[in-house]
Amino acid sequence: MTGELYDLVEKAIEEGNKLDAKYIEARLVKTSLNMSILKNGVPELGGIFRTNGIGIRVLKNGGLGFASFNEMTKDEMKIAVAFATKMAEATGKKRRKRIVFSDEEVHEAEYKSIGANGKRPMEVDTEEKILRLIGLDKILTELQTGAIIPYRFFQMIDQTEEKYLLTNEGAKIKSEIDLIQLFGLAVAVNPNTGSKEQLMIQKGKAGGLEAFDFWKIEEYIEKEVKTLGKIVTEAKEAPKGVIDYIVGPNVIGIMCHENQGHPSEGDRILGREGAQAGESYLTKEMIGERIGSENVTIIDDSTLEGSYGFYLYDDEGVKAKPRYLLKKGIFKNILHNRESAAFMETSSTAAARAIGYNREPIPRMANTYLEPGDFSFEEMIEDVKLGVLMQNFTEWNIDDRRYQSKYVGLEAYLIENGEIKHLVRRPNIETTTPKLWGSVDAVAKRDLLEFDAATCGKGDPMQGAPVYHGGSFMRIRNVEVR
Amino acid sequence: MPEKINVINMIELSINKLNELDFADYVIETQRSNRSQLRFADNQFTVAKNWASTILGVFAVKESRTVATQIEDLSAETINSSIESLAKLAGSLPKNENYMGISDGPFSYPNIEHLADPDFLEFHDKSIDNVESAIRAAEEEGAKRSAGVLLWDVTERNLRSSHGALVKSNSTSFEFSIRSFVDEKSSGSGVAVGRLSSKLNFEKAGRDAGKIAKMSVGGINGEPGKYNVILSPKVAGDIIAATPAAANPFNVEIGLSWLKDKIGEKIGPDLVTVYDDALLPNGLGSRVCDDEGHPTGRNMIVENGILKGFIHNTSTAKKVGTTSTGNAGLVFPQNSNIFFEPGDQSFEELLEISKDKPTLYITNNWYTRFTSYVDGVFSTIPRDGMFLVENGEIKQPVRELRITDTMLNIFKNIKAMSKENIQIKTWEVPQPVFIPYVLVEDVNLTAATS
């Protein structure tokens, strides 16, 4: 980013001060993004996306205004600051309760999370990227699984995002983060019965193309596709009645994200997302209440090196640290930005994230996971009389208070009398959040901890935020399956 | 400081660079827009936003290598360097065997009524009052608090192609949605959208939301099982319109559609006829040309329950020996407005039709997800008011149920549609749809086990 653009950010702060903004922040974001799409083995598109813009947020007279622009001139900057200020005033005077921001320590910092030397997104030749995708597609078509895979899609995105945040309180944060993401879809068909099953693949990581080796991507795809073939050719009906479930990192991750991360978001609890992503079954008065069993500790931590949701300072300049959402089953923390924190008379938990220059920072998750326990995998299985081991999931959804959820298994096995048996088809858990967390009686050790990448959707306009979620294995007792 | 760059100059600059680098086919599009938004919750404004945005998009082809760029970093230097990068990118890609050209002109473009609101500039000053009128109406119906969003936008679009397309069009849009609560579990929603501000009834949207919220008070947990369901246009816009939206060859090829090999098959009852119609006055998906510069039109997807065809761009059309339907997106075909021919019954008559069977009226839903797209196996969660219908009347509010079924079953089991045809575009239904209330028989509802 050039000095001229930094100047424009600084001028925006001066402009806001001239207009008597109580608070103004200017966030310059420059993104260079490459995309490759492969459809059924054919390179459908190579894409290059370049953005460069500034988002302005102003607090004045108890109202909040936001404006962004990407024609980087002084005139556009002045229009944006004037709009944000004017609209903050106009809407603020209509409010019963003024919007304020929590007081926070002010930081000046600079940090990076970038790819390995020679592996940064802009350093790697497109041909190398597309050949890697073609190689993945070949695994799907050439591997003998007993099934055919006529539907295949891969999309790879690699990007570098540079950010410069300045506030009139003195916060000054510069960051540069490389991100890589791989999305895949494969549908296996049993040629004899026509039975089909879909596999969605999402991998993501802060860093460069070295991620493919970190993921051991070819090995991973091969394993997943072999299993998919077995599911459509061998899987039997899943058991019903009252059974136990042992769920793997992929399933724990989505449960932590949906059943505990989202309802812990401060803006949801305040009703600010009521018309879109919904509200929450949690309230601030419930802090300290038991939600789950002693075995359930859920952490959200943006500071995990190399993670897909990585950041050290949030988009309001607040320093990040791990946040305990549930600790030994007790509701501990809310994911706050400075606005929701002030409403609840507490401090921000550094959860303010904006996915681009043209979005406002709102409370989000980063990397959410279940803290590992002390069980070995074998110990978890051995006293299950009748149950299902659900390694990963396919369909899922949850109501907008985050109370009633459903998870459908993809790779799943029957457990009988402490032994893992055959594959079962589409087992399903349809239960409430307190019942889910309350029924966890065992969690596996740290050496089984794994993370998956996801894109978390929230906000209006939509803000798809990169996140990790994960865990080791956990056992859920006595789930009623109809 | 970088100088402001005129959009026509951006296009000329791009054309010169693309020609210099020997790209045979290309489409260049600029969109300059100004968009504002008011959000509110607990009957108070939470934030006011404005986006001033200029975007340059280029789709280009060199020796059957297809590449694209979208630039929001608008200096001449970035435009030139991005197109140079495209040439390098094209040089490193294998051929796209699916690419069969872009639409060839000369073109004659349709004149679409009510694409742009002549009163757009005056709307800004009325925006706060409009939102407040909706909040008040919801309160009058019994709501304690409302949340929602009003978005208004003006966009100037310029498009040029190597094959004769030359288009300039202006459009506006207005999108309002409100969700009202009596208590944390008793809620309702309302929506008002279109291209003309005069066509939006903010008060009615608020009244609808407040009324449903009030009616939902005292809800009990519903019993899982088979029901006849009456779907509001918001719900139908998601799970009924999903089937004509799946008539997209790109989605079929990658396994995201349940309509493979179904053209000519009866997938719904006689009363269902659906178009993709880009020419609808006031339609949020209406536009004069697609992303190749091909003129748009009205294309039948389902006629009297029979799947008649898919939407196409030039490449997908040539692959199956037909012509473009004017639905090109940058990468794959995209719908304009999905338009359902309305039925001939009133909403009250829909309630009556179903009176001998257990029936639910579902006013809103969210979080539709698929176990299998190719088989259309999905579930979705009703949100806001959901009611048992007894003897033709809306009665007991119920909660905590989930629709768990297949898209083909649901479409096949459509029994009746109402006369009203309402335009929907919401957070849950981003695709513009014109659709009535829809009665569907034998829908499977499941529930959490505790």
Image (cartoon, coloured by chain):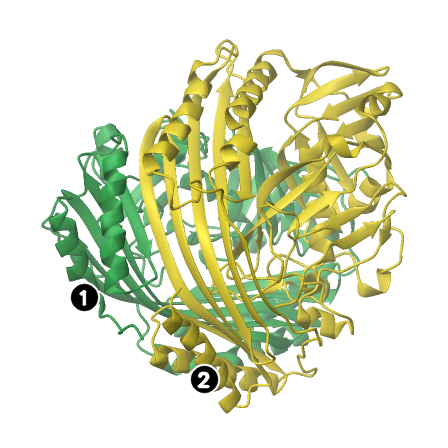
Camera-nearest residue between A180 and B236: A180
Compared with A266, A197 (above or below) is above
Residue at 62 percent of width and 11 percent of height: A234
Element on which disc 1 rests: helix
Spot occupied by residue A45 in the image (x, y as percentages of width and height): 32, 39
The quarter in which the C terminus of chain A is drawn is top right
Type of amino acid under label 1: Ile
Q: Is residue B307 visible?
A: no
Spot occupied by residue A8 in the image (x, y as percentages of width and height): 41, 76
Q: Which chain is yellow?
A: A
- Residues packed near mark 1 inside 10 Å, few (<14), some (14 to 19) or many (20 plus): few
- Residues packed near mark 2 inside 10 Å, few (<14), some (14 to 19) or many (20 plus): many
What residue does disc 2 label?
A82
What residue does disc 1 label?
B8
Residue at 71 percent of width and 60 percent of height: A335
Whether residue B261 sits left or right of residue B401 in the image: it is left
The reply to whether dot 1 and dot 2 touch (C-beta < 8 Å) is no
Camera-nearest residue between B348 and B64: B64
Q: In the displayed image of the protein, which residue is found farthest to the left?
A: B106
Spot occupied by residue B194 in the image (x, y as percentages of width and height): 41, 65
Type of amino acid under label 2: Ala
